[in-house]
Amino acid sequence: TAEGGSATGGWELSLTMPIGDASAGVSLSSSASVTTTGGEAGDAAVTGGTELWYTVPIGATSLSAGYGSSAATDVSGDTTTTTEIGATMSMSF
């Protein structure tokens, strides 16, 4: 009998760009995982995502706003989508 195992692979690409004193960025990612049982590969579990953000300094503080979305498909073919929007204010001394 053939042994089983699993393989995982993926990639991520991120870019941050200065816009005057501020900065903006984007990140794209994808990964997949496949399990092998008895010498036969099963369906892949796949996840992909996108993030966007913008950060602007305001004196000793900075304000960041971001958006993120991801989708995950499991081995049974069910897809879950998650979306997040957020803002952060930070101070430096």
Image (cartoon, grey):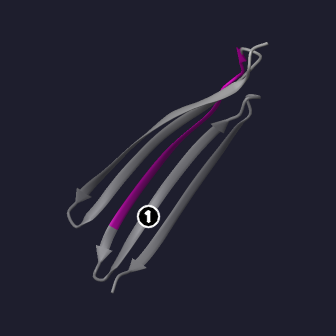
Residue 47 versus residue 37: which sits nearer the camera? 37
Residue 2, how many percent across, how many down? 74, 14
With 21 as the anchor, is 86 left or right in this view? right
Query: Measuring 77% from the left and 16% from the top, which residue is drawn there?
Result: 38
Q: Residue furthest bottom?
A: 93
Kindly identify which residue carries mark 1: 65
Residue 16 visible in this rendered orientation of the protein = yes
Residue 64 versus residue 91: which sits nearer the camera? 91
Q: Is residue 36 above or below residue 84?
A: above
Query: Measuring 66% from the left and 26% from the top, which residue is drawn there?
Result: 44
With 56 as the anchor, is 42 left or right in this view? right
Dot 1: what SS?
strand
With 67 as the anchor, is 8 left or right in this view? right
Q: Is residue 64 above or below residue 73?
A: below
On the rendered image, what quadrant is the N terminus found in?
top right
The residue segment tinted magenta is 40-55
Residue 34 versus residue 91: which sits nearer the camera? 34
Residue 34, how many percent across, how many down? 65, 27
Residue 3 versus residue 45: which sits nearer the camera? 3
